[in-house]
């Protein structure tokens, strides 16, 4: 019995040594050669094999768990990129890592089963899997990378595990069929635009999560200083942003197509990128003093917006901020704004005139006065657009460089000021001359002053002179009459 056990143990040890030797030999040659079975290409990694490539024409439903007696532990970056013939897939429990873009562009993929061994879903792992309808992310996954499920336009349902801690930027970007999001209790980080362009979103919940709060289908951080995301539907059409909010995050109200009016309090300093993107019913946006920046595409495609007045605190308007605001007729800039970026008001076909203050230091390409050409491929200049600018300003330079009609609003004022100054100088000269004449008379010799006085008396047309002259003539007449009587 003992000999049998010893022999068996020795045989097992020998087999292990043989396998290890073979594995090591392959590892030594793997730098030069890759192992392929016609469908998959493998590489040696620590602990087993990684699938590094799949034949894009292959039709498979399962990924093997073993190869040459060793586990498949990893699906490498881009391994299944563009494998459009795969419609369903089961990933074995031996797999611990799914790389970036691993299944990106698998447009035929409808269902996928993920293993419990996963701890991370890498960046863009399932990007543009346009037929994927649901995904159940298993317990153990702690992070979902940026763009992980972006452009999964048919994704209707996603289950996020309690183990999840972070959701990356644009993780569910453009998941247009997604109707509900439940933020698990352990999530502490939600990236920028994580749920942007989810235009079917009806419900957001974050029960038992201490880092986030949901009110009336709007997701905020715990202190309600950052507004992350509003459901595209089932929110008030007239929305008052709470006065605790300082930042309206990127994509916060994107595709909220029922929203008509928004009041932004003075606490808000930043309206993020694409914050109100494609809010096609938005007619009024009330911006308060305190706002510093409107980021790129913030109000792009807000086709019902007719007018907007910017607060005096606003410093910059981002690229394409009001792109294709087709009904926008009136824009009021306050003196203080310094930067207007590329295409900020491009394709605003109803905006035919703007008054740009002298505080503006830079205006980007196509910021004003441009629309799209007939085939919507390039900008063309509007024929009925004009600008009111200040002399020497960046706006004047922009108008000249782009051959746009303009008027210099302070030129007439300068002319008026010049005329006023000239009249003032003339009056001042007259007063000065009068003062000099009076002063000259006082300083003249006494006999000269007396002669002037006599001359003035002789030529004096005053009332006293006339009366005295008449009195003398009357006395002379009376004397003559008396003389005649005596005779």
Image (cartoon, grey):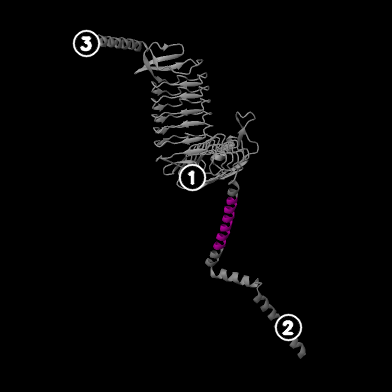
Is 207 situated above or below 477? above
**Which residue is identified by label 1?**
291
Q: Secondary structure at mark 1?
A: loop
How far from the left and from the top, in percent, is residue 318?
Answer: 51, 37
Give the camera-side residue of 294 and 160.
160
Residue at left 58%, top 51%? 417
Please state which of the two labelled residues, at mark 2 or mark 3, is closer to the viewer: 3
Looking at the rendering, the stretch of residues picked out in magenta corresponds to 416-436
Q: Earlier in the sequence, mark 3 or mark 1?
A: 3
- SS majority, magenta: helix
Q: CA distance from mark 2 to mark 1?
A: 97 Å
Q: Is residue 73 left or right of residue 349?
A: left
Q: Is residue 348 left or right of residue 165?
A: right
Q: Is residue 211 left or right of residue 419?
A: left
Please state which of the two labelled residues, at mark 2 or mark 1, is closer to the viewer: 1
Give the label on residue 477, or none: 2
């Amino acid at each position: 019995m003992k000999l049998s056990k010893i022999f068996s143990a020795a045989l097992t040890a020998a087999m292990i040594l043989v396998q290890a030797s073979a594995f090591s030999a392959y590892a030594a040659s793997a730098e030069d050669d890759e192992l392929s079975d016609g469908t998959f290409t493998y590489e040696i990694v620590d602990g087993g094999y990684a699938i590094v490539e799949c034949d894009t024409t292959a039709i498979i439903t399962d990924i093997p768990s073993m190869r040459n007696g060793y586990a498949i532990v990893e699906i490498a970056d881009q391994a299944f990129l563009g494998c459009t013939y795969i419609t369903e897939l089961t990933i074995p429990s031996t797999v611990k890592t799914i790389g970036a873009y691993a299944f990106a562009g698998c447009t035929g993929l409808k269902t996928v089963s993920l293993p419990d061994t996963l701890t991370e879903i890498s960046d863009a792992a399932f990007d543009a899997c346009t037929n994927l309808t649901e995904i159940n992310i298993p317990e153990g996954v702690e992070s979902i990378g940026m763009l992980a499920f972006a452009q999964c336009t048919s994704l209707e349902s996603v289950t996020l595990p309690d183990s999840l801690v972070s959701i990356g930027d644009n993780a569910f970007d453009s998941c247009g069929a997604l109707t509900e999001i439940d933020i698990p209790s352990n999530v502490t980080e939600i990236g920028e635009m994580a749920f942007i362009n989810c235009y079917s979103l009806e419900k957001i919940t974050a029960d038992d999560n201490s880092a986030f709060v949901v009110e009336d289908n709007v997701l905020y951080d715990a202190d309600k200083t950052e507004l992350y995301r509003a459901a595209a539907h089932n929110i008030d059409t007239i929305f008052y942003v709470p006065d605790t909010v300082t930042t309206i995050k990127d994509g916060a109200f994107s595709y909220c197509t029922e929203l008509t009016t928004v009041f932004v309090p003075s606490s808000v300093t930043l309206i993020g990128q694409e914050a109100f993107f494609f809010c096609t019913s938005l007619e009024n946006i009330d911006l308060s003093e305190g706002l510093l920046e409107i980021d790129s595409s913030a109000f792009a495609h807000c086709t019902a917006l007719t007018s907007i007045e910017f607060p005096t605190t606003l410093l910059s308007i981002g690229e394409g901020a009001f792109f294709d605001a087709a009904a926008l007729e009136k824009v009021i800039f306050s003196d203080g704004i310094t930067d207007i970026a590329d295409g900020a008001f491009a394709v605003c076909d109803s905006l035919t005139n703007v008054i740009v203050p002298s505080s503006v230091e830079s205006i980007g390409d196509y910021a004003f006065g441009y629309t799209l050409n007939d085939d919507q491929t390039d900008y063309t200049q509007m024929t009925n657009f004009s600008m009111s600018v200040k002399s020497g300003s960046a706006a004047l330079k922009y108008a000249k460089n782009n051959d746009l009609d303009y008027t210099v609003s302070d030129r007439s004022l300068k002319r008026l000021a010049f005329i006023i100054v000239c009249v003032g100088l003339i009056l001042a000269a007259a007063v000065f001359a009068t003062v000099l004449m009076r002063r000259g008379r006082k300083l003249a010799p006494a006999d000269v002053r007396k002669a002037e006085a006599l001359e003035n008396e002789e030529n004096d047309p005053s009332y006293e002179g006339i009366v005295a002259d008449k009195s003398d003539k009357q006395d002379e007449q009376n004397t003559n009459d008396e003389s005649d009587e005596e005779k």
